[in-house]
Image (spheres, rainbow, N blue to C red):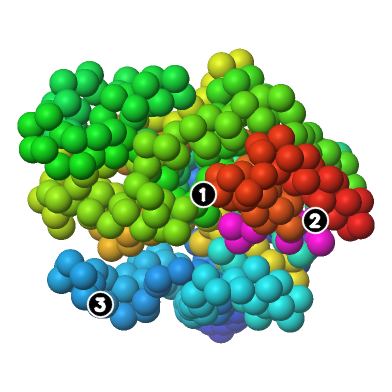
């Protein structure tokens, strides 16, 4: 009997020790996974990874996420439309639900001086995840974490994103030999040609093709400038935003088979702003301005576009948020979208736009930050953006085309198609002074202060000098 008691006591002690050792190992694992590291955790994806479970679902800690734009943590009501929208607390709560033991903190800011503010934050390790539309600048300074090791480790499927959305945000670090992935998209954006079908009907002009040529746009703009044959009111064939004029010129240049230049880092970059096709493209816009309202370069004359009082047939570049405006105006059936011009050889056209999320190089929570980046491409996150942030974001994932709310808006098929053929990577010269140099000189030509060739020769000279000084 004593021997039995002794054996029982030994078994009990052994069991307790095993439990304690197991608990210690578990705690060590949790602590290790939340420690700072410059490389992703060595743990391989779990067997459940293919079904959506994360190999890092046990991560804990505080994650700081920066947002730029019209974001609010709390719910709000749009003063223009009266439509209520949910604040970004919705995605915070869902992430914390999926990763128990985590806490998400948001740092929000507007668009004023956002690049400078973001750089200061990156240098001071103020956050873990950053919204970085100026991603090329920060990657070049070695301020962002490269993502390919995380993608490979988790076998993360990039094919869930719309065509070009990953490539559009590729950038180069100081030691990279080619563009690499430093960010994942979460805000989609594009520009569209938008036209008024009612005016086309009143003038007896065929609607624009889904993928029109500059010649088609010019021809139809000319035909619909003058006294409307049905209403007798003055109509104009075209309008555009002066601040976007240089982008329109570059887009026409793409259609003519050319592009902005070559290189990615400043030390390798050569712009081609005064090529013969660029001069032809700027002359096209100078000619098109004859069919626009008199005050177009001062931002006047197009105030009624998208409303029932509209008197302009075609808008050369419109953000996709126009679908919200026509919903408010009740003109959903009146306005349609067409694709931007595209390079015939590359099948791409128009400046890549939107925003990606990236991980700060000095973040102490890189694995958790990576989980946030993956989360931002989920149906939950993207549906939240569509439902509550539509004024500043279009979906970036392919599955959005099958959402009932998206299919109910006829213009969305063109918007998603345009987002899939934007020029990638995005024009790198727009991350610096050449962007403003080109815009300033294009506007001088449109104001007839100089010829198109003189304007673009000046843009080429000044941009080249600026690039060489970097």
Crowding near pointer 1: few (<14 within 10 Å), some, many (20+)?
A: some
Question: Which of the two discs, 1 and 2, sits closer to the camera?
Answer: 1
Q: Is residue 436 visible?
A: yes
3 or 2: tag closer to the N-terminus: 3
Bounds of the magenta segment: 132-142
* Residue 236 coordinates in the image, percent (x, y): 29, 39
Question: In 3D space, how far apart are the residues under numbered discs 1 and 2 (Cα atoms)?
Answer: 26 Å
Whether residue 140 appears in magenta in the rendering, the answer is: yes
What residue appears at the point 41 percent right and 67 percent down from the top-left corner?
95
Q: Which residue is mark 1?
A: 244
3 or 1: tag closer to the N-terminus: 3
Question: Is residue 26 depicted above or below 229 in this figure?
Answer: below
Q: Which residue is mark 3?
A: 76
Q: Which residue is mark 2?
A: 140
Viewer-side residue, 271 vs 136: 271
Dividing the picture into quarters, in which one does residue 259 lie? top right
């Amino acid at each position: 009997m004593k021997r039995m008691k002794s054996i029982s006591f030994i078994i009990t002690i052994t069991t307790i020790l095993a439990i304690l050792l197991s608990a210690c190992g578990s705690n060590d694992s949790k602590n290790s996974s939340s420690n700072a590291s410059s490389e992703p955790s060595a743990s391989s994806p779990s067997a459940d990874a293919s079904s959506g479970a994360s190999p890092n679902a046990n991560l804990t800690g505080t994650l700081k996420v920066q947002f730029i734009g019209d974001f609010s943590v709390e719910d709000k009501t749009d003063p223009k439309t009266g439509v209520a929208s949910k604040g970004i607390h919705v995605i915070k709560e869902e992430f914390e639900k999926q990763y128990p033991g985590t806490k998400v903190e948001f740092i929000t800011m507007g668009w004023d001086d956002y690049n400078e503010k973001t750089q200061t934050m990156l240098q001071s390790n103020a956050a873990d995840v950053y919204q970085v539309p100026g991603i090329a600048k920060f990657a070049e300074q070695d301020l962002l974490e490269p993502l390919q090791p995380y993608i490979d480790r988790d076998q993360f499927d990039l094919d869930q994103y719309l065509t070009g959305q990953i490539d559009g945000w590729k950038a180069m670090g100081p030691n990279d030999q080619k563009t690499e992935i430093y960010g994942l998209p979460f805000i989609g954006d594009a520009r569209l040609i938008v036209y008024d079908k009612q005016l086309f009907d009143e003038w007896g002009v065929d609607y624009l093709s889904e993928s029109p040529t500059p010649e088609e746009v010019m021809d139809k703009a000319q035909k619909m400038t003058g006294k409307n044959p049905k209403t007798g009111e003055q109509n104009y064939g075209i309008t555009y935003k002066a601040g976007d004029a240089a982008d329109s010129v570059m887009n026409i240049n793409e259609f003519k088979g050319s592009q902005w230049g070559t290189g990615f880092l400043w030390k390798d970059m050569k712009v081609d702003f005064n090529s013969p096709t660029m001069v032809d493209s700027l002359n096209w816009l100078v000619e098109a301005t004859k069919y626009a309202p008199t005050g177009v370069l001062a931002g006047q004359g197009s105030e009624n576009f998208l409303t029932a009082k509209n008197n302009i047939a075609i808008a050369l570049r419109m953000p996709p948020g126009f679908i919200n405006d026509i919903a408010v105006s009740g003109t959903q059936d009146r306005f349609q979208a067409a694709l931007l011009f595209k390079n015939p050889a590359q099948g791409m056209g128009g400046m890549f736009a939107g925003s990606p999320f990236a991980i700060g190089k000095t973040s102490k929570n890189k694995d958790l930050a990576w989980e946030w980046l993956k989360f931002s491409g989920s149906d939950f996150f993207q549906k939240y953006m569509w439902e509550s942030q539509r004024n500043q974001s279009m979906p970036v994932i392919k599955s959005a085309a099958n959402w009932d709310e998206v299919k109910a808006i006829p213009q969305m098929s063109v918007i998603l198609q345009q987002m899939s053929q934007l020029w990638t990577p995005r024009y790198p010269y727009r991350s610096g002074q050449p962007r403003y140099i080109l815009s300033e000189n294009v506007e001088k030509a449109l104001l007839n202060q100089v010829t198109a060739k003189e304007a673009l020769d000046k843009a080429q000279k000044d941009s080249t000098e600026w690039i060489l000084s970097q």
